[in-house]
Image (spheres, rainbow, N blue to C red):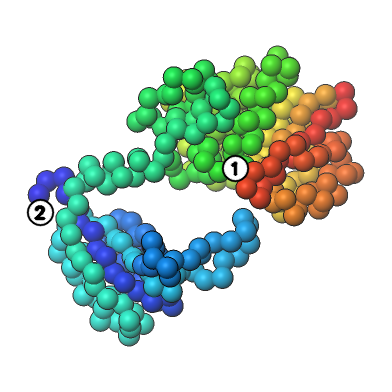
Amino acid sequence: MSEGSMFELRLHAPQDSVEAISDALMDELGALSVSVEDADADTAAEHALFGEPGMPIAHSAWAHSVLKALFTDEATATDAATLILAQDWAQGAQLVSVEAVAEQDWVRLTQAQFAPVPITPSFWIVPSWHEPPAEARQVIRLDPGLAFGTGTHPTTRMCLRWTALHAQALASGWTRVLDYGCGSGILAIGAARFGAREIDAVDIDPAAVQSTRDNAQANGVSLRAGLPELAHGEYPLVYANILATPLKLLAPLLCAHVAPGGSLVLAGILERQAEELKAAYAGTLVAIEVSDSEDGWILMTGRRAG
């Protein structure tokens, strides 16, 4: 094997064996990564696998799928293919190829999937390997990682857009900010970009807490990141970009953290869930309304009486 190269194993697999083959490649056979693609892509037989956001998918794979597994060396890739094809539960799987791929090409291909993301015409999320667009006046540097929130999902974009559009009127009062369920920390960093101070970012996942700290450091932002018990007292601005069910359960807690006159920004909600969220927050200190929508998702916001 030449220095700087890895090997890609490609298999065709029927729908009912894709999950088992993927699990075996990753968990037992040494694959660094496994991806699944539609073998009928770009043909008349191509079809979408995913439907409405948040709804369960009908199948876990396409009728004819291509599995691509990345290995550090050719022998491991070849052994993996041999072992998979010998299993009864992998009946119907076919070897397509085992080919060397330069490591730098994998990095380039991965990075090419993440281009700068516009939030407003002057506010952008920019991966570290890209130059900011000329029109960008505010920039968050954020690379894809383990934690949710790279600016590519509608819920994240809507929260950041709300921040940018309301900063001129409200940012002077954002003396404390809480990002509850911070993920990558992108909302906390966005608030800092527009003048927020004393920012607490919390998550139940320690990996998200570390990701938030790393991203804050990369962006020159000062914040405190930790588990949910870090949050205390009242904040003029509270974000929670989670999902509808935890947002309903957390309604009393989140609203108790909103200071008089403060704003609550909620995301991770589907359009069809608007009324149940309104009902959940009806008896709290903050009445919420839909303030933005994108691709089937909505942003719900409210102000506590001051």
Mark identifier at residue 146: none
Residue found 78% across the figure and 49% down from its top: 274
Residue found 84% across the figure and 25% down from its top: 260
* Location of residue 17 (image quadrant): bottom left
Q: How many marks?
A: 2
Secondary structure under the numbered disc 1 in the rendered image = helix
Q: Hey, what amino acid is under mark 2? A: Met
The quadrant of the image that shows the N terminus is bottom left
Comparing 212 with 115, the one in front is 115
Going by the image, does 240 lie left or right of 136? right
Residue 90 appears anywhere in the view = yes
Comparing 106 with 79, the one in front is 106
Look at mark 2 in the image and give the residue it sits on.
Answer: 1
Looking at this view, name the residue that lies furthest to the front: 44
Q: Position of residue 202 (x, y in %)?
A: 61, 37
The tag earlier along the polypeptide, 2 or 1, is 2
Q: Hey, what amino acid is under mark 1? A: Pro
Q: Position of residue 246 (x, y in %)?
A: 70, 50
- Circle 1: is it few (<14), some (14-19), or many (20+) Cα within 10 Å? some
Residue found 56% across the figure and 70% down from its top: 58
Residue 212 appears anywhere in the view = no
The quadrant of the image that shows the C terminus is top right
Going by the image, does 216 lie left or right of 237? left
Image height check: is 108 above or below 259? below
* Location of residue 22 (image quadrant): bottom left
Looking at this view, name the residue that lies furthest to the left: 2
Going by the image, does 58 lie left or right of 142? right
* Location of residue 28 (image quadrant): bottom left
Mark identifier at residue 154: 1
Q: CA distance from mark 2 to mark 1?
A: 42 Å
